[in-house]
Image: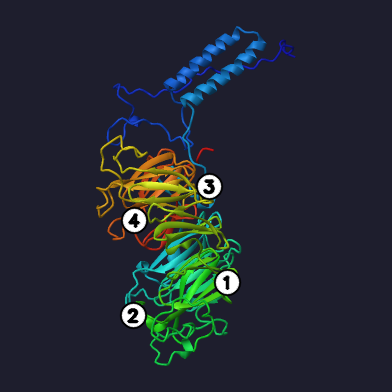
Amino acid sequence: MRDDDDQPWRPAAPARASAVWEGAPARSDGGPRAADVDDAGDLAPAAPDPAVSTAGPLRPPGRASSALTGVARAAAARSRRLTPTRRVAGLIGATALVAALVAVGGVAAGPEYAPVARASFEVDDLRTAPTTTAWSTDLRSVLAPGAEADCVGFDGSTRLGDDDVLVTTSAQGYVPDSGCEDAPGRLARLDARTGEVLWVADVAEAVGIDAIGLQVSVDPATGDALVAVQSIVGSGLARLDTETGEVQEVLRGPPDDGATGQVDESDGSDESDGSDVSDGSAAGGLADGSDPGYDPEGSSPSTGSSTGSVLQVEGLSTTAVVVSEQPGDRFSDEGAVVAQGGRSLYRLYRADDLSAPTWTGNAGAGLSVRLVGDLLVIDVGDEPLVVDARTGAVDPLPGGLRNVESWAASLDGVVLSGRAGGEPTMVSLDSDGALRWSARLPSTSYPSVTDSCISVTVPGGEVTCLDPRTGDELWSRTLRAPGGGDRDGDGAGGSGSGEAEQVQAYFGTATDDVLAAVVDADEQGDPSGLDRGKEVHALAALSGDERWVTELPVASYVIATSRTTGYAATFFPSGRDTPTLIAFDLSDGRTLWTIELSSGSFTSAFWGPTLVRVDPGGVVHGLTTGVELAG
């Protein structure tokens, strides 16, 4: 036993740090550090992005932080002179004081971001430019084997669950004798996190038509997909099991079981005495050649032949589909309408049953129908109607609305805008088609709809938010063009170019913030749209308070948001310029990075949560930054 074994154990004290923070190494010439000089040779602070987790040496505290440290030191010195009881009380008081200073001074406060209201719209939070390819998949070899690279395009904008997407193919640049006539109409399920193709379905072959494009919707109740297959003339429809890719049902033309009426090809020029068309229903136009309009009783078979009739998908929602049957001789081989007049039969189906329609109706060619969810709005002159796809019930469109111009889903129902009594009006219907409310609008407008706000924007910069449940105005404010005064509309604060002449609203983002843009009047004539002349404002849905503002090119739209990052894409229909993606901070609007998007055929920038790039050869790449976010 050692002599000191009976002594209390005392661990060795750790070595004292030479400094509480590591200073920057000084240059021998006394100039700034290389890390503090940007590419242009200007001094640039090396502050890390507050939303990105970083590792490295501690930095010197700022002045405010040093002041707080001084307060803490003084409190500690005083505490050592107090009794234990008073020392505990003093510690609690000092903690509260520091917390109050932080709250008031904002020393430790981080950036503020709006809550994610719609997780199904959220995409990856890419705080720095994506430089890493997480995966690559050759879609052309999988979905379009043998097709020329410039004949087929791919799009993965239909999201399925958290990570998967449905990828569609489409014919690009199709004209007769172009060599692109046989581009396939296939659908695939892709894991957007790994790039794995889970299944492929040849929908065009199942429907039996040559496809130039596909349109997809997913029924939230069953998870099945409705796929509309568009050809040069006519359409087809299929219902697929999205777990397996198996085709469940196909709708490819007039039914052969006589359950519904056939197309009446009469153009109203029948030389008979008209006794068989006294009500203008199944047999076509009236004896005087006029078009009787919509006929709700036109569900019985007509005497005309259905040979050569064409099926057209007129509207597709997640829960229903409406199709028309039209005479084939209305269309040229290139799909152009070459004959007017005559009648068409319309049929409405539930998404989970394509075997029998819930409603049919006869009408003149060119009838305007709008399908949102289970509600079909038929805009026919002075007597617009609403049809319930679940029951086939037909009722007058409530609210006195005529000339429907816009429509969108809202709170399991629909909001429509048009005119009532000659005045711009919006009506809201519940899921049964009953009127919730009706509200006058300042002018004709296309609204942006969320569960928190229906935002209406009009030329001049005015943005108004209506309560989706009552139609009451929650707030209204006028935005000014860049440099055109303050953003509250009192006219002070700058000269600029006056009020904006164009206001645009966006939807499809993960937050309920109202995103409205004002365009500088001097920039609207820029044919390229490259110059930055558009300010996008994020306004809190319930108050209208501005969260942030960012300046973007005129030819750009906000397409997605994540938890802390927003994304805008430029578009150039001429194809002469390369589209770009601009990422910006959702707390202050500052630009974070910019990259070029696919230079080939159009595709969505985000497939599910993943940013992708599709190269001209048909290989899709999933992109990432490799940077993990804090929290």
- Distance, label 4 to label 2, CA atoms, is 33 Å
Q: Residues within 10 Å of mark 1 (few under 14, many from 20)?
A: some
Question: Which one is closest to the eye, mark 3 or mark 2?
Answer: 2
Q: Position of residue 543 (x, y in %)?
A: 47, 41
Q: Say what amino acid the circle numbered 1 marks.
A: Gly
Question: Which one is closest to the eye, mark 1 or mark 2?
Answer: 1
The residue identified by callout 2 is 338
Sequence-wise first label, 3 or 2: 3
In what element is the residue under mark 2? loop
Position of 508 with respect to 248 (left or right) is left
Sequence-wise first label, 3 or 4: 3
Q: Determine whether label 4 and label 2 are within 8 Å by CB.
A: no
- Residue 392: which disc? 1
Sequence-wise first label, 4 or 2: 2
- Residue 117: which disc? 3
Question: Where does the N terminus fall, quadrant-wise?
Answer: top right
Q: Position of residue 546 (x, y in %)?
A: 42, 39
Sequence-wise first label, 1 or 3: 3
Q: Residues within 10 Å of mark 3 (few under 14, many from 20)?
A: some
Sequence-wise first label, 1 or 2: 2
